[in-house]
């Protein structure tokens, strides 16, 4: 009863702080006039006031106004005004052409803090290995986001590890997001409309991960006509096909990508006269169907499938009569159906049912008939995760200065951490099939006070069940924005989050070794508390944008491999290999400056940070630097429009070297068998007590927009990775010689030396993409042109 009274008093207060006359509730969508694609982040505001909002990932907005007119604007599009006279639902279509930089926007929009984003143009122009854009590598240029190692797409966000990031495609979780040991990400840029990475201040509808939320919104198919593209680079071939369906009320888009590396791997093993053959490759496939039967309802179907495969085999020619094959395959399946509906100008709902399946499978087949007995066996290992989820998200515009988001999610997740099969065993080891159920309810209040303070106050409640283990968690979150003026805003945010699955990962291998294990009685759910302060400002009519963020994060109940282990393979006692009960601290400051207008654009980012870990059974229980701690990280990205056809892009990155555990000595240890022999063992210092050389690299790229001889649009990209051929350390190793083949010889003493392995030298690349389309208007013009040519020919007269 007391809570009801408090809510009633609070409602009356908000009523009194907001005008109550002439109020209209306007909601709807903002779309591209030609293609029908939703415009995410478009500005909707009431001219002459500070009253405004922006569209969400569905292109949806809801705004209460007190006049009779609203205006919509978006970068690169002509602004549009609409008169309104009552509560209504509208679809606003904007026409491409006029740059927003020439328009003064009076409506104040809420600035997003702790969110890193790149627009599509920035993402497509940033140079990368292979000559094609990579979504996750592009994000690594922004402060607070670092790569695990050179060339890797794995993200470490504010001192977190890669398993603490939630990846969403149209609000659907994807478990495995990399190819080739992290060298490429699975996200095809041709499918992407918008991407946002939350480093803190998570919206209440998101949960289940500690460090970041990577929310990717896919494009809808173009409704103007059937079109597509074909692209080829040094690493892969890709295609896109999209177009309208059902009399332009629906659309589809399909993309695919396949590596060209298989012949290269096989040729390399042949040229070096290897005793075995090897191939590696990957593919991924994306499809999205969108249907808008009317202005209130939308239905979407998403499908994704992607696999990596790495196989080594010997047909017996190199080792006598012995034949073997080592096969590895890993990847995702994802399918989902989503329905959203505008119930009224105040109320919007988005419902999603999804299925995601990740699996890692290794197998060894061996056959040897060279001896007296035939040796024939097969071993296999499987680790997998299946996730069935149902969620419903609601938006309700309660008052002019009070909007409410609420919803629920239920997930049934099945884990197989360690399934082993050995053909030589009559009695196979029984594997665990672990079924978990989690439910979540959330409630978020977006409140505006005195026209200068925006507050998000939310609570997320999670119930988790795993066999005999049950957990009920409450996650309060607060974010407050205080506008100093129309260009400068301060922010404070606090969040409490929990994670109910742990990722065990060993980096540095071409083959995936990501294994997920569920929280339970002995392996507790991980948790994190984060505080952050921030400032954002705009200068010269938002031509220059700057932001500063300071954060402090505590982590608890972390899990990893015990010392001496790097895999769960080998036996069924996988829990004995896991060290749990870990804690961590991450803190830092981030600075980002962007130039957003003109022919010369770009950004510069810097972060200073420190991240530590502490486990009861690691490093004698003492605190140590996190494996991917980099105190200083600086990056610059520059894009210059040379002409209508040519553009230039350059990126330079500097980072402090990664920590490592050094060898500080060696000792001779006797090995007693039939005779006494001696072996040499290294003596290691404290964990991560030394640092590798600093990392830095320059990448450049040129893009040529042209047309083929048939008039089709085409794009050439010429890139150079690591322009000045910096030999950045991948890892260090110790030995008497660089090849590492010398062994301990008591009669011939040699000093122990440290050597470095580097991964990527200077790499020039080239890629090409050609576009095609079937446009009715274009066909009509072509027919008229042909008729004119024939007519002129038939009517030609000699003088």
Image (cartoon, rainbow, N blue to C red):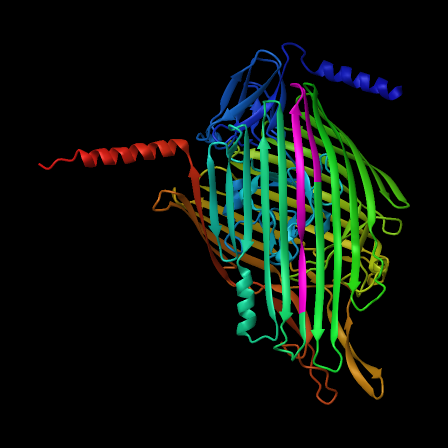
Where 753 sits versus 51, above or below? below
Where 722 sits versus 226, above or below? below
The one nearer the camera, 274 or 62, is 274
Residue 429 shown in magenta: no
Q: Quadrant of residue 324?
A: bottom right
Query: Residue 686, percent across and down?
Result: 78, 65
Q: Quadrant of residue 666?
A: bottom right
Query: Residue 685, percent across and down?
Result: 77, 68
Magenta stretch in the rendered image: 325-354
Single out the residue that lies furthest toward the top.
21
Q: Quadrant of residue 696?
A: bottom right
Where 196 sits versus 131, above or below? above
Query: Residue 218, percent across and down?
Result: 59, 38
Q: Is residue 311 left or right of residue 105?
A: right
Which quadrant would the C terminus be assigned to in this image?
top left
The one nearer the camera, 32 or 556, is 32
Q: Is residue 104 visible?
A: no
The one nearer the camera, 171 or 261, is 261
Which quadrant would the N terminus be assigned to in this image?
top right
Q: Is residue 262 left or right of residue 412?
A: left
Query: Residue 95, percent across and down?
Result: 46, 28
């Amino acid at each position: 009863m007391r809570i009801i009274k408090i809510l009633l008093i609070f409602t009356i207060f908000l009523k009194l702080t907001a005008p109550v006359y002439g109020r209209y509730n306007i909601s709807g969508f903002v779309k591209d006039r030609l293609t029908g694609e939703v415009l995410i982040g478009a500005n909707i505001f009431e001219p002459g006031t500070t009253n405004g909002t922006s569209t969400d990932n569905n292109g949806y907005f809801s705004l209460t106004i007190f006049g009779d007119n609203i205006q919509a604007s978006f970068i690169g599009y002509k602004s549009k005004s609409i008169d309104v006279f009552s509560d209504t639902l509208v679809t606003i279509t904007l026409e491409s052409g006029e740059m927003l930089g020439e328009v003064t926007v009076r409506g104040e929009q809420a600035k997003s803090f702790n969110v890193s984003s790149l627009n599509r143009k920035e993402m497509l122009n940033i140079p990368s290995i292979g000559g094609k854009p990579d979504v996750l590598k592009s994000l690594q240029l922004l402060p607070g986001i670092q790569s695990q190692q050179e060339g890797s797409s794995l993200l470490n966000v504010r001192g977190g590890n890669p398993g603490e990031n939630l990846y969403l495609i149209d609000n659907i979780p994807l478990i495995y997001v990399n190819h080739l040991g992290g060298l490429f990400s699975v996200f095809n840029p041709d499918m992407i409309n918008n991407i946002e990475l939350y480093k803190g201040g998570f919206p209440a509808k998101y949960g289940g991960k500690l460090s970041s939320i990577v929310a990717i919104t896919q494009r809808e198919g173009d409704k103007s006509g059937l079109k597509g593209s074909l692209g080829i680079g040094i690493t892969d071939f890709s295609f896109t096909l999209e177009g309208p369906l059902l009399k332009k009320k629906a659309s589809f888009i399909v993309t695919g990508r396949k590596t060209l590396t298989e012949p290269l791997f096989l040729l390399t093993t042949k040229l070096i006269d290897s005793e075995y053959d090897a191939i590696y490759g990957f593919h991924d496939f994306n499809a999205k169907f969108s249907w808008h039967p009317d202005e209130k309802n939308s239905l979407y179907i998403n499908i994704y499938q992607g696999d990596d495969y790495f196989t080594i085999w010997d047909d017996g020619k190199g080792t006598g009569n012995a034949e073997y094959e080592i096969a590895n395959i890993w990847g995702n399946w994802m399918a989902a159906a989503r329905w959203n509906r505008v119930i009224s100008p105040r109320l919007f709902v988005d419902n999603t049912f999804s299925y995601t399946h990740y699996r890692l499978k290794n197998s060894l087949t061996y056959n040897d008939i060279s001896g007296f007995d035939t040796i024939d066996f097969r071993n296999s290992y499987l680790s997998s995760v299946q996730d069935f989820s149902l969620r419903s998200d609601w938006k309700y515009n309660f008052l002019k200065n009070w909007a409410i988001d609420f919803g629920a999610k239920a997930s049934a997740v099945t884990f197989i951490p360690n399934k082993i099969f050995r053909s030589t065993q009559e009695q196979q080891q029984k594997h665990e099939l672990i079924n978990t159920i989690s439910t979540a309810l959330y409630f978020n209040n977006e409140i505006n006070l005195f026209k200068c303070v925006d507050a998000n106050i939310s609570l997320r409640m999670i119930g988790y069940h795993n066999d005999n283990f049950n957990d009920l968690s409450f996650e309060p979150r607060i974010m407050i924005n205080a506008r100093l003026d129309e260009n400068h805003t301060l922010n404070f945010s606090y969040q409490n989050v929990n994670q109910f699955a742990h990722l065990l990962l060993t980096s540095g291998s071409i083959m995936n070794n990501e294994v997920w294990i569920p929280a339970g009685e002995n392996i507790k759910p991980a948790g994190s508390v984060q505080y952050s302060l921030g400032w954002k400002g705009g200068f010269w009519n938002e031509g220059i944008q700057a932001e500063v963020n300071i954060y402090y994060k505590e982590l608890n109940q972390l899990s990893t491999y015990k010392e001496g282990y790097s895999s769960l393979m080998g036996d069924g006692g996988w829990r004995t290999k896991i060290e749990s009960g870990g804690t961590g601290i991450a803190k830092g400051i981030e600075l980002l400056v962007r130039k957003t207008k003109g022919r010369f654009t770009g950004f510069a980012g810097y972060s200073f940070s420190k991240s530590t870990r502490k486990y009861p059974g690691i490093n004698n229980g003492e605190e140590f630097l996190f494996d991917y701690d980099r105190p200083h990280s600086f990056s610059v990205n520059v894009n210059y429009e040379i002409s209508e056809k040519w553009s230039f892009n350059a990126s330079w990155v500097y980072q402090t070297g990664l920590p490592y555990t050094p060898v500080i000595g060696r000792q001779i240890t006797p090995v007693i068998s039939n005779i006494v022999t001696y072996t040499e063992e290294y003596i290691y210092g404290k964990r991560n007590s030394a640092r590798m050389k600093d990392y830095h690299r320059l990448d450049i790229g040129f893009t040529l927009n042209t047309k083929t001889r048939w008039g089709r649009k085409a794009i050439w990209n010429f890139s150079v990775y690591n322009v000045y051929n910096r030999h950045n350390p991948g890892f260090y190793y110790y030995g008497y010689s660089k090849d590492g083949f010398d062994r301990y010889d008591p009669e011939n003493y040699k000093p122990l030396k440290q050597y470095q392995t580097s991964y990527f030298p200077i790499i020039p690349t080239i890629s090409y993409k050609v576009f095609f389309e079937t446009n009715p208007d274009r066909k009509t013009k072509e027919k008229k042109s042909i008729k004119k040519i024939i007519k002129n020919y038939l009517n030609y007269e000699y003088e």
